[in-house]
Amino acid sequence: MTKIEGFEFKGGKTGCLLIHGFGGSPLELRWLGERLAENNYTVIAPLLPGHGTSYYDMGRTGWRDWHRTSEEAFYRLKHMCDNVFVIGLSMGGAIGLSMAAENGFSGVVSLAAPLFINDWRIKFLPILRYILKYPRGGPPDLKDVSKRKEVFSYKRVPMRCVEELLTSLSDLKVKLPRIKMPVLLVHARVDHIVPPKNVEVIYILVHARVDHIVPPKNVEVIYNLLGSQDKRLVYLDNSYHVVTVDYDREIVKDEILKFINSKR
């Protein structure tokens, strides 16, 4: 397997921190990062601990590790740039929102971020974590199945990490009213993992109308809980969960560029 790493592009004095999703990698943000770099933005997309290798490695990490690595990348950008925007996909969006409650970003872009997970097994997690330590996961949630080869995801998921993620999302719900900076929320109308209802709680939210991972209900909750008065929600009609790779990625890119250009 080709070694998976983070990536960086040196550009102007506006920086973009790109944070990938749970069990994923910076590959799912590579195309977006290249488009941002073409527009003279400085880009950093770190590889989160335990990702891009094996699910056993992931099982030895947790939310604090992923959050810390994201913050370290933010401080690097802060020393290089006058303005910093954080752009996160799925769990990366949740990390970005969590950081936004404590750091001075110029704006937050949350792409298909979860506040709750669409999986009937979640309620049995306290028991399942001891029975199924590494249950099978599904393929990347893409409407354009031909793009699955362009991204990386684990075939199995450490239940311990799922439990860590859920705990962190409970903490995030409390933090959302403290977020005052501009936010863009993007979500698929059909998300099989994170229902769009989640998105009602975030800043500039982009979400597909169909997302099997994070159903659109997520984004609605986030939108409503956000303390920011400068927030916008964008729904996508032709994508599922991985909106940075799917059919609507050009729309995602255009919305992000419009958002950043209006706030810097």
Image: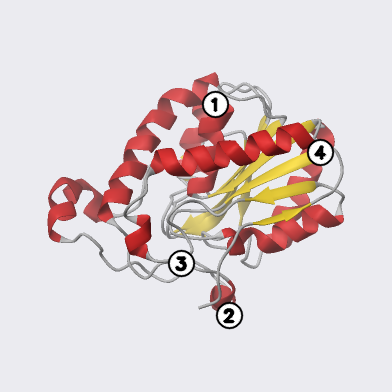
Q: Earlier in the sequence, mark 3 or mark 1?
A: 3
Q: Residues within 10 Å of mark 1 (few under 14, many from 20)?
A: many
Q: Secondary structure at mark 2?
A: helix
Left or right: 114 in relation to 162:
right
Residue 44: numbered disc: none
Q: Position of residue 126 (x, y in %)?
A: 16, 46
Of badges 4 and 2, nearer the viewer stands 4
Q: Amino acid at mark 1?
A: Leu
Q: Earlier in the sequence, mark 2 or mark 1?
A: 2
Q: Position of residue 137 (x, y in %)?
A: 34, 66
Q: Residues within 10 Å of mark 3 (few under 14, many from 20)?
A: many
Q: Residues within 10 Å of mark 2 (few under 14, many from 20)?
A: few
Q: Position of residue 178 (x, y in %)?
A: 53, 19
User: Which residue occupies 53% across, 54% down?
Assistant: 189
Q: Earlier in the sequence, mark 3 or mark 4?
A: 4
Between residue 19 and residue 177, name the one nearer to us.
19
Q: Which residue is mark 4?
A: 14
User: Which residue occupies 51% across, 68% down?
Assistant: 152
Of badges 4 and 1, nearer the viewer stands 4
Q: Residues within 10 Å of mark 4 (few under 14, many from 20)?
A: many
Instruction: Look at the numbered discs 4 and 1 and tell me whether their residues touch, using CB distance below 8 Å.
Output: no
Q: Secondary structure at mark 3?
A: loop
Q: Give residue 259's quadrant in the image.
A: top right
Q: Give residue 114's quadrant in the image.
A: top left
Q: Earlier in the sequence, mark 2 or mark 3?
A: 2
Q: Which residue is mark 1?
A: 226
Q: Which residue is mark 3?
A: 153
Instruction: Look at the numbered discs 3 and 4 and tell me whether their residues touch, using CB distance below 8 Å.
Output: no
Quadrant placement of the C terminus: top right
